[in-house]
Amino acid sequence: MRISSILALIALGTGCAERDPAPPAASAASEPTGLARDPFTYPLGAWRRDRERAHRAILRPAHILVAHNAASSDDNTVFGVTGASRSRQEALELAFKLHEELKQHPERFAELARKHSDDKASATRAGSLGNVYVDHVLPEMVDALSTLSVGQLSEVFETSRGFHVMQRQAVPPAVELSGHRLVLKYGGTRLWPRARHAPERTREEALELASRIYQEAKANPERFASLVAEHSESYDALQGGDMGVWSTHSFVSHPQLQDLIAETDVGGITQPVDTYEGVVIVKRRAVVSPVQLAASIAIIPYKDVMALHPDVKTDRTRDEALLLATGLAKQARRKPQTFGQLVAANCIAGPCMSAGSFPRADGDPAVVAELEKMRIGEVSEPFEGTYGIYLTKRLDPKGIPVHGEPLRTLYALPEPPSPEMIRDVMTLPNEELAESTKLAGQELSVTLGLRGEQLERFRAIYDQLARGFRESPREERGTHAEVSKTSLTALLGEHEFQRYESVRNAWYDARQARASQQ
């Protein structure tokens, strides 16, 4: 079994060259040492090495987070972590206690997540993080998920947020969704409010107000549009909170909110959900074909909006920007064919574009409102937008490419090697791992039927890997394995390397079975 464990590392190709920095040993100076057990350190997941595939792959994890007083509690697109008073050692002991219970009773995952998880955004949903892209969760979570098949439970592992126990869940079939939303801001929420500054209310006050609005909307769903107009503080309130049409397999900022919308009947109202944008209430609507608009857009920035776009530098005041835009508008209306030149001269990063088509719900609300008053070919008067003073020319969307990133292609996710194999690889002492590596190279080369120079090179790759394991610290094992995987792929070719992996898996399983009978 020990000999075979090295094969998992070769198969994973776990490399550390691009690994994100591990979270600091939180409170190491103040915590007592000598914990009975340490959290597990997973090798660098294959999905993280393949950045393009990770950018397009969806997973559905559920987790229980046990935070501590030295862990980060900053919000992000997945977590709604509240601060914890327990020490790191207390958190680790609780995480292991929960893990032991789940190994005996995996059916209790939802119950224990609701009761113990410090990620309040997912705890109410049985720990589910919803459908998330691989590159939108913490890297250590990706590493753990890379080793799990659907339904499997992770070891206890650590991130900057605390300690996690994770389960990989099946991704449901794609469903198209549509709706309107109402957003209530509070101190610390992100993205642009309807006004330039978020209201001076606390999170608790926002939740209380959202509860009252929800009750009114639930009793009178036909009034949702007027409630959005009266209360919503998000940038899309100008469009009635229109969320457009999207798939449950598309990237969304709030996957748990998406799950809630998918569970709500058309015409129904979701319960308030706390997100990093604010507290959100959604009325689900039937999916209709999105209205497509097209435009050229020029933006004249000024210094008061530069916080929204820190890459753009200007000392121009709003009045100066408006004066410049007014002059450009006169010029463009005299010679509409020059509008593209105006865009090129005044474009900034963001939604500024020379010519592009976009769904109505995806456009800047101020731009959409202006375009809907215009005829095709007409140039607007200057108007206020998210990034400054805007000018736009309405175009015919026929034949104009869609602005922005195309719909992501989803790839099948690879089934990982055995978690037991990975655990062996990451815990063996250096010397034992080095000896096992040499023996594995010799035995596998025979099983594969290698001959001549190919046999010599195969064993040389394993010998080099063994030296790396013997002479390097444990955290560098992945770097050596990455080099070895590259060398084996070049030696065997892509097709034969896949056969090698199949032979390796069968060989490992056979040795595991024999070891369990002894």
Image: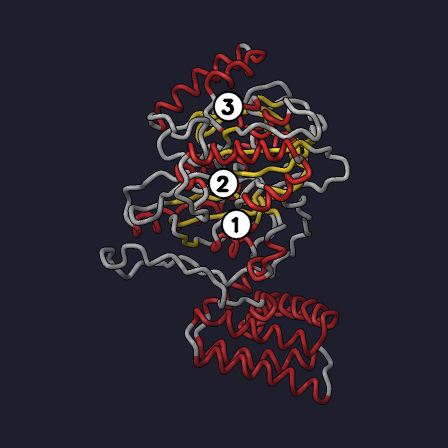
The numbered mark at residue 12 is none
Which residue was labeled with disc 1?
A: 153
Q: How far apart are marks 2 and 1 (CA)?
A: 10 Å
Position of residue 340 measured from the top left corner of the image (x, y, whole percent): 64, 42
Callout 3: SS: strand
Residue 205 appears in the figure: yes
Q: Position of residue 319 (x, y in %)?
A: 42, 32
**As drawn, 44 above or below 452:** above
Mark drawn on residue 182: 3
- Amino acid type, label 3: Leu
Q: How crowded is mark 3: few (under 14 residues within 10 Å), some or many (20 or more)?
A: many
Kindly identify the amino acid type of the residue bearing the numbered disc 1. Answer: Leu
Colouring used for the render = secondary structure
Q: Earlier in the sequence, mark 2 or mark 3?
A: 2
Where residue 13 appears, x then y in whole percent? 58, 68
Amino acid type of the residue that numbered disc 2 sits on in the rendered structure: Phe
